[in-house]
Image: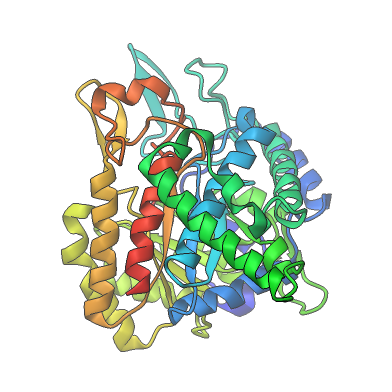
Amino acid sequence: MANQAEWNKSSWKNFTALQQPNWPNDEEVKKVLDNLATLPPLVFAGEIRSLKELLAKAVTGDAFLLQGGDCSENFSQVTAPKIRETLKVLLQMAIVLTYAGGKPVIKVGRIAGQFAKPRSADTETIDGKTYPSYRGDMVNQAEFTEEARVPNPKFMLKGYNMAASTLNLLRAFTRGGYAALHRVQAWNQEFVVQSPMGRSYNRLAKQIDHAIRFMNTIGIPTDIPQVNQTQLFTSHEALLLGYEEALTRNDSTTGDWYDCSAHMLWIGERTRQVDGAHVEFLKGVHNPIGVKIGPTYDLEEIKRLIDALNPENEPGRLTLITRLGLKNVEKVLPPLLREAKREGYNIVWSCDPMHANTYTTESGTKTRNFNDIFAEITCFFEAHWSEGTTPGGVHLEMTGENVTECTGGARNIIDEELANNYLTTCDPRLNAEQSLEVAFQIAEMIRS
Ligand code: PEP
Ligand code: CO
């Protein structure tokens, strides 16, 4: 493995990069990447450093990480209403966790760049026809035709532009008054208002409203950034290494390298080989990094990964996102926590209760059950409590829309109802109501 001194933003090319598209034309790819390398960064190093400082607090339990959004963003969904609904539900969840759970919440969206997907197979076969798998809108199109499935490097450029316009609107909403605490009630989604979750949320929003009015009455100014503004950070899986390299820039104030495609990047379960290209690339950028860990992990390998990605044991640098599945979590999480504690690693422990709880219904729909999702989160908290480690956050696939992709929840969506509004092109997401429900339940746990 290359040591740190030999790292540069292209050194990943000396290692095996899994899950890369088979681009038909290398010249075209080079043209796009050269172009991307001249375009402005999407986020800047100072923001990335603030996120890392906040995440350092989640290591010790002084803040809680809420990371969530689509499994896979779609270009056709880069619209104001869609972005607003996602932001709204994240803000709602954050306010529930802050107010009912009593902890500052670090909001990180799977948004503004989550356009590339790892797949379990290179090709897909339907009715005797075999085409390349859909790898996200930044690579090819979901439609099952030969033409649509050909990887097109121009989609990386489009992805950059889509990320830029998403981020622009998010910045406007979070800084321009939309996210002000005076508006907590207004964030309640129309379809959620009448539900039990919507009513619990409204009660909480009213209390916040009273508190702000009380402050005003006694002369405490509420026209301050802590009340009027918020910050939403962006994240995506760092999968297409050419794209990530093109957006990696040297920060003039520190001389350090930052991947300026998003504030936080994560490495997926399928690409986290210690001697692989993804780990090599992320070793050298100074962003906060997440690593997904599935149920079949090898403890020694995880330790090598931690040492490779965070050799200085810097708090906030490394978030381990366990996605173990309800069936495995009680058995396989404690040994990992115990060993990490023994080694004294500074880690943000986050729970992804989605990716190992996926199943296919009898009619062939990919779904997840709300009870399994919630039960994995509960087991995650309990394992941390009994090992004396800190449950630092959650990582969810969710949307602000009224989709029917995951079964269960307060409205108890059943298998037969999944087809009513099943919109995802990749994994099933919690809808706004189910997301709020998760937030209320987590709030109970972080308060205790
Ligand atoms: C994902 O987060 O969408 C994903 C593919 O996760 P994992 O790498 O954990 O399977
Ligand atoms: Co997913």
- Residue 139 found in image quarter: top right
Q: Is residue 38 visible?
A: yes
Is 373 displayed left or right of 312 in the figure? left
Q: Position of residue 132 (x, y in %)?
A: 46, 26
List x then y, in percent, for residue 2: 54, 72
**Residue at the outermost front position:** 217
Residue 321 position in % (x across, y down): 40, 62
Location of residue 243 with respect to 276 vertically, above or below: above
Kindly indicate the quadrant of the structure image that contains residue 380: bottom left
- Judge whether residue 17 can be spotted in this image: no
Q: Nearer the viewer, residue 261 or 182?
A: 182
Q: Write the residue at 63% across / 59% down.
A: 233
The residue lying at 61 percent from left, 35 percent from top is: 82
Name above or below for residue 9 compared with residue 91. Answer: below
Question: Horizontal placement of 8 versus 14: left or right?
Answer: right
Q: Nearer the viewer, residue 428 or 300?
A: 428
- For the C terminus, the quadrant is bottom left
**Residue at left offset 78%, top offset 71%:** 251
Residue at the top extreme, as displayed: 127
Determine whether, in the image, residue 353 is placed left or right of residue 214: left
